[in-house]
Image: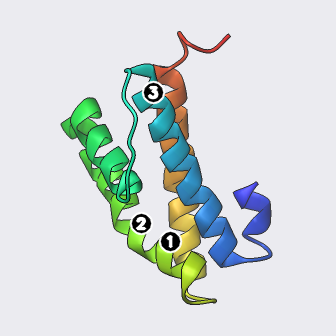
Amino acid sequence: MAGFVITQDWDWAFSISYNAALQASRAYMYSKGYRACGQEAHKNTFEFMKIALGKEYEGLIGFFDRMRPKRNRAIYDTVGLITETEVKELLEKSEEFVAIIKDKLKKYIL
């Protein structure tokens, strides 16, 4: 979906890509019996993932956490904040991350 939206609206494509990484992270958390809640649920989700997946994925997860404030501003504060370069990088990293999590969760997938 973000691949299509990127041609229409960089802010929304950025949000969709970020959300893909967030939802994959939540699926992984749930599979381990955890759930992030509260006002900092996104932040706590990525912190959990850094610990759960270890150093190998720390940089990738850190990237999503660094995108968190920008996604928030793009959704709630400033229209046109996201650049084409930013959305393409986030889309690429989100696709990579979702594939990693799918692989880790394949025993749960029917």
The image quadrant that residue 65 belongs to is bottom left
Question: What is the three-letter code of the residue carrying label 2?
Answer: Arg
Question: What is the three-letter code of the residue carrying label 1?
Answer: Arg
Question: How much space separates mark 3 and mark 1, taking CA atoms?
Answer: 23 Å
Q: Residues within 10 Å of mark 2 (few under 14, many from 20)?
A: some
Question: How much space separates mark 2 and mark 3, taking CA atoms?
Answer: 21 Å
Question: How much space separates mark 2 and mark 1, taking CA atoms?
Answer: 5 Å
Residue nearest the viewer, comparing 95 with 67: 67
User: Could you tell me if the residues under marks 2 and 1 are in contact, i.e. CB atoms within 8 Å?
Assistant: yes
On the image, numbered disc 2 is attached to which residue?
Answer: 68
Question: What is the three-letter code of the residue carrying label 3?
Answer: Tyr
Q: Nearer the viewer, mark 3 or mark 1?
A: 3
Q: Residues within 10 Å of mark 3 (few under 14, many from 20)?
A: few
Is residue 67 something that shows in the picture?
Answer: yes
- Work out whether 105 lies above or below 9: above
Q: Position of residue 53 (x, y in %)?
A: 28, 32
Q: Nearer the viewer, mark 2 or mark 3?
A: 3
Mark seen at residue 30: 3
Is residue 82 something that shows in the picture?
Answer: no
Q: What SS does tag 1 mark?
A: helix
On the image, numbered disc 1 is attached to which residue?
Answer: 71
